[in-house]
Image: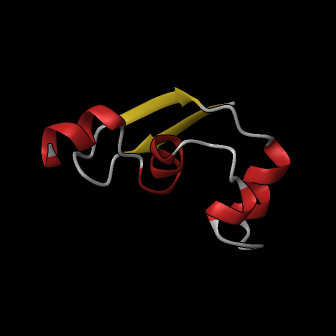
Amino acid sequence: MHITKKSGLTGKVHTRDIPVKPEDYADWQFGQNSIQECIPYLSADDREFLMTGITPEEWEAAFG
């Protein structure tokens, strides 16, 4: 699923292809449970992107 988000760190807009089931993504967006409970099969990087729009590359550049 292609997800476009604005980075909370840099303000840049990024689109990533995240292997998330639409129904699981919707459950999380509508507050059914935490992202870890709704989408446990995603990597931490993918979950971070969904929550904040921060890419792994931005995270590495900012926090090493």
Residue 47 position (above or below residue 56): below
Question: Which of 58/14 is in front?
Answer: 58
Residue at screen point 35% across, 45% down: 54
Residue lying furthest right? 23
Residue 56 at x, y percent in the picture: 34, 36
- Above or below, 33 against 35 in this view is below
Residue 5 appears left or right of 58: right
- Name which residue lies at 68% across and 31% down: 19
Is 58 rendered above or below residue 35? above
Question: At x 15% / y 49%, what residue is drawn?
Answer: 63
Residue 38 found in image quarter: bottom right
Left or right position of 32 against 61: right
Please identify the quadrant where the C terminus is shown: top left
Locate the N terminus and report the quarter of the image it occupies: top right
Q: Residue at x 71, y 73 (%)?
A: 31
Q: Position of residue 23 (x, y in %)?
A: 85, 50
Dividing the picture into quadrants, the one containing residue 20 is top right
Q: What sort of colour scheme is used for the picture? A: secondary structure
The answer to whether residue 56 is left or right of residue 28 is left
